Amino acid sequence: MTNAGILGIGYAVPDGVLTNHDLERMVDTSDEWITTRTGIKERRIANGETTSDLAVLAAKKAIAHARIAPQDSDMVIVATITPDMAFPATACLVQDRLGCTRAGAFDLSAGCSGFVYALDVATHMVRSGPYRHVLVIGADTLSAITDFSDRSTCVLFGDGAGAAVVGQTEGRGVLATYLGADGGQGMSLYLPRERAEAASHKDGFIQMAGSDVFKFAVRIMGDAALEVLRRAAVAPEDVDLFVPHQANIRIIDAAAKRLGLDGRKIFVNVHKYGNTSAASIPIALAEAYEQGRLNKGDIVTLVGFGAGLTWGAAALEWEVPKA
């Protein structure tokens, strides 16, 4: 069987920064309250940039990192819950702007789990034979659907994009994936309808039952990580780097505790970006690489949860040497 893994990565975030102190002037909250409960200090907010704008920037970096040409891409997958428009797919807009003229393109919607879902799809496409390079992008501009008068949600979310080129590898690449969903809890985190069609002010923004989502996340992050490691035949102590969805530091800490990992094996950047949905994991992965925390041959575990309610985990052997 052909092995498939990540050949290159990249990320992009808007220049605009919204700090906790900025939010203190907008809603009844405080830097101490936000930091204590979430670990977030600031987040990036788009100022005119669309989801496709950020996706293109991240993808260009991933393509360059993988040392391929845009025309070498056989498929473009954009995981997003904030597409530029209902249709065409944001992936088609990205494909055109990148010049991936040979590639098919489609969007995938799995909330914050979207990148891991797309990575699973890309891995199987490459393993099947006809696809040599699949461009996987997680991109969201959650600020467009966030009510900045609702302190329970506006402190959490930010904008960004992360991308990876998935292709054939000499090493083992992706060892295992684990995807799941509990649609019965779907209304714990949802967008009632598109902003343009909203019947009321609240209808156009993210609605979240925070306590329910928190309890779900604390359980499923650990469960999913352990299951994907079981499928990969990897012991938790053999994990070199744990890259979780960056939603809340307490959720990350709970998952790490379930795996018995110390802080040196956990990558955290939630304090800088907040929850960027499908972009969260690939941004963290790209930053970990930039910081020299990924070595060729390292065992890496990715795990996330999101709207749906969904979850996704992947275990992989890192393929890219240090720069």
Image (cartoon, grey):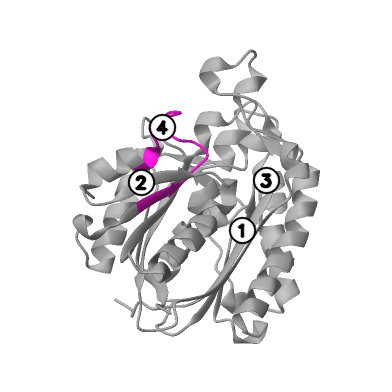
Q: Which residue is at a point 64% across and 77% down the rendered structure image?
A: 231
In the image, residue 15 above or below residue 58:
above
The reply to whether discs 2 and 3 touch (Cβ–Cβ < 8 Å) is: no
Q: Which one is closest to the eye, mark 3 or mark 1?
A: 1
* N-terminal-most mark, 4 or 3: 3
- Circle 3 sits on which residue? 34
In the image, residue 224 above or below residue 57:
below
Q: Amino acid at mark 2?
A: Ala
* N-terminal-most mark, 1 or 4: 4
Q: In this image, 59 relative to 291: left or right?
A: left
Q: Which residue is at a point 48% across and 61% down the rendered structure image?
A: 119
Residue 43 lies, in percent from the top left, at 51, 45
Q: CA distance from mark 1 to mark 4?
A: 23 Å
Q: CA distance from mark 2 to mark 3?
A: 38 Å
Q: Which one is closest to the eye, mark 2 or mark 1?
A: 2
- Circle 1 sits on which residue? 304
Quadrant position of residue 315: bottom right
Q: CA distance from mark 4 to mark 3?
A: 30 Å
Residue 305 lies, in percent from the top left, at 65, 54
* N-terminal-most mark, 2 or 1: 2
Q: Amino acid at mark 3?
A: Ile
* N-terminal-most mark, 2 or 4: 4
